[in-house]
Amino acid sequence: MSPRVIPRTGRAAAGIRLKTWAEIRMMREAGRIVAEVLDAMRTMVQPGVATAELDRWAEEYIRRRGGIPAFKGYPSMKDEGGPPYPATLCTSVNHVLVHGVPGPYRLKEGDIISIDVGVNFRGYYADAAITLPVGSIPPEARRLLEVTEAALWAAIAQARPGRRLGDIQWAIQHTVESQGFHVAREFTSHGIGRALHEPPSFVNRGHPGRGLPLRPGMTIAIEPMVTMGDWRTSILEDGWTVVTLDGSLAAHFEHTIAITEGDPIILTALEEDPRLAS
């Protein structure tokens, strides 16, 4: 789930708390559940399946594994207040960028669906998202998914000491815009740990070599949100569902990572990182 408030990139890193290895391991416990849910979605997403059915399964699974759905009951994005988020998953179909609310809609052949899930496990959070094809999809939609996921991996490669937040931002922007797509500008990647959203909050576009220095112990959720057409968005009357203003397709990929002295650890990967066992 992506915050909407966008601070100025490069401000002082007030509020950032570096995590210990013990805390990173607890975040991995949350991240493992997230990974298992998203892995199951790869099989469950089929034509004819209602998004509410996906949500119901995810909530039951998370609770059975000892976690708490991180999104359910999350306070409204609206400045003037509004309903809290009512579901476990965000299920964003086609032109929905993020925060699509699960309901009776049944997936159709040719749709794409972004599934975003967060888990609170014993007070520690993890958050990740994938965009999946529903059956066979057009080549340009397939390319949108490939480019958005490539932007995530390009950003993760920059998440190491000696780099700056702007290097992550630029990796996303360059990967996306070089392929003719656009980065959503009204929603952000974010820090994560003892809360779902922690500092820093940062847009997915910027300049290399600028911004906050990256340090071991930082934990962030990197989430490129990409549109096939115009980057501008609108929030529907439910107070949550974010759609592209021009109705173009949108995709969303996300991982929670921990910055270390070397390569980052992907806390929401299905595979185990041996450094967490030591």
Image (spheres, rainbow, N blue to C red):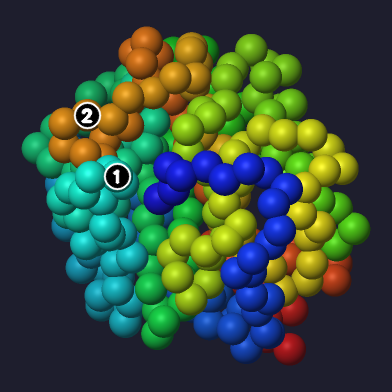
Q: Report which quarter residue 59 is drawn in.
A: bottom left
The residue located at (58%, 32%) in the rendering is 148
- Badge 2 density bin: few <14, some 14–19, many ≥20, Cα 10 Å: few
Q: Is residue 234 left or right of residue 236?
A: right
Can residue 118 be seen from the camera position used here? Answer: yes
Percent coordinates x, y for residue 203 in the rendering: 59, 39
- The amino acid beneath tag 1 is Asp
Q: Which residue is mark 1?
A: 79
Which mark lies nearer to you, 2 or 1? 1
Instruction: Please tell me whether residue 168 is drawn above or below residue 237 in the rendered image.
Output: below
Q: Which residue is mark 2?
A: 236
- The amino acid beneath tag 2 is Leu
Can residue 139 be seen from the camera position used here? Answer: no
Identify the image quadrant of the C terminus. bottom right
Query: Mark 1 falls on what kind of element?
Result: loop
Q: Earlier in the sequence, mark 2 or mark 1?
A: 1
Percent coordinates x, y for residue 5 in the rendering: 46, 44
Percent coordinates x, y for residue 53 in the rendering: 16, 49
Residue reaching furthest right?
Answer: 162
Spatial CA span between label 2 and label 1: 14 Å
The residue located at (38%, 73%) in the rendering is 120
Percent coordinates x, y for residue 80 in the rendering: 23, 45
Query: Mark 2 falls on what kind of element?
Result: loop
- Badge 1 density bin: few <14, some 14–19, many ≥20, Cα 10 Å: few
The residue located at (33%, 76%) in the rendering is 67
Q: Is residue 28 left or right of residue 122?
A: right
Question: 180 and 195: which one is in front?
Answer: 195
Question: 79 and 222: which one is in front?
Answer: 79
The residue located at (85%, 53%) in the rendering is 163
